[in-house]
């Protein structure tokens, strides 16, 4: 009689079995069980892999990749890689007035996202992307980071708060006054908010022909407003 010893190894496995990577991201796959040596190949999708070490580099475009490990007996195990597009932030650039708010949003990458102010002033909700500019003029950089560590930045320009000049004027009947805007975020519109008189798009105001008061309002493109007070007086009698 003769006997033979048979060694039975565990079934071949490949880890990680599933993986999400950014475009051009890297990871190393590891095989165990089966009968070594192992070889690694890409059976579908893009990217590249080292046949001996399992070191994988994702392609430059989003998609799905299948990785196969094979052992010395031809057994195989597979893993699926999901490749996501780079993370983006919107808007990528914005101009605000001091104290204004804006909500940033992210796309691509792998959620969840977190938001932060990388430089400059203002504050941001790390989960929602709701940003409030600083109370003075300057600039800031807002960053979004996805769960893979990818980042994208947005540039924020902060102008001074909207003002109107002069802040007050006393006019005779039907007299004219030019109001001017400054700071805020143009373009601007002018309107008579209360009282009588008229104002055109450039801020030229004409008083009413009766005594009283009026308020002239300038509004910028973000809805910020500034007010000027007008007093209309009767002409002096000689």
Image (cartoon, helix red, strand yellow):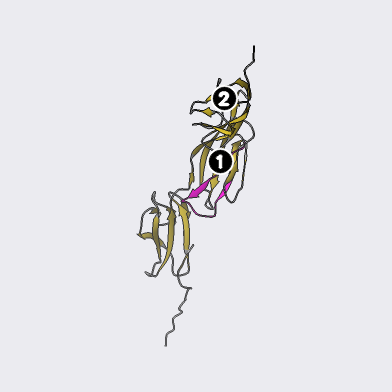
* Residue at 49% over, 37% down: 93
Residue at 61%, 21% (x, y): give it.
Answer: 171
Q: Is residue 6 magenta?
A: no
> For residue 216, what is the image quadrant?
top right
- Residue at (47% x, 57% y) in the render: 20
Mark 1, residues whose alpha carbon is within 10 Å: few (<14), some, or many (≥20)? many
Locate the C terminus by quadrant.
top right
* Dot 2 or dot 1, earlier in sequence: 1
Label 2 crowd (10 A; few <14 / some 14-19 / many >=20) = some
Q: Is residue 74 visible?
A: yes
* Disc 2/disc 1 C-alpha distance (Å): 52 Å
- Find the magenta span and give its range: 99-116
Of 125 and 168, which appears nearest the observer? 168
Q: Is residue 214 left or right of residue 41?
A: right
Q: Secondary structure at mark 2?
A: loop
Q: Are marks 2 and 1 in contact (CB under 8 Å)?
A: no
Q: Position of residue 74 (x, y in %)?
A: 37, 69
Residue hosting label 2: 209
Q: Which mark is residue 142?
A: 1
Question: Is 39 placed left or right of 109 in the picture?
Answer: left
The image position of residue 130, as x and y in percent, is 58, 46
């Amino acid at each position: 009689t003769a006997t033979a010893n048979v060694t039975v190894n565990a079934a071949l496995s490949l880890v990680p079995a599933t993986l999400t990577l950014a475009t051009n991201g890297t990871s190393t796959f590891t095989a165990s069980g089966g009968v070594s040596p192992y070889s690694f190949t890409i059976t579908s999708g893009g990217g590249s892999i080292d046949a001996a070490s399992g070191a994988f580099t994702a392609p430059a475009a989003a998609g799905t990749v299948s990785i196969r490990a094979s052992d010395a007996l031809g057994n195989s195990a597979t893993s699926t890689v999901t490749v996501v597009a780079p993370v983006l932030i919107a808007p990528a650039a914005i101009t605000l007035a001091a104290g204004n708010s804006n909500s940033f949003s992210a796309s691509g990458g792998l959620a969840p996202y977190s938001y932060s102010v990388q430089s400059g002033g203002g504050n941001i909700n790390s989960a929602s992307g709701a940003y409030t500019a600083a109370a003075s003029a300057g600039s800031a950089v807002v960053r979004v980071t996805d769960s893979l560590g990818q980042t994208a930045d947005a540039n924020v320009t902060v102008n001074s708060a909207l003002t109107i000049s002069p802040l007050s004027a006393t006019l005779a009947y039907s007299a004219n006054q030019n109001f001017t805007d400054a700071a805020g975020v143009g373009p601007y519109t002018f309107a008579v908010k209360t009282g009588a008189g008229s104002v055109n798009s450039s801020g030229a105001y004409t008083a009413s022909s009766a005594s009283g008061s009026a308020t002239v309002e300038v509004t910028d493109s973000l809805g910020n407003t500034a007010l000027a007070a007008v007093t209309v007086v009767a002409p002096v009698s000689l």
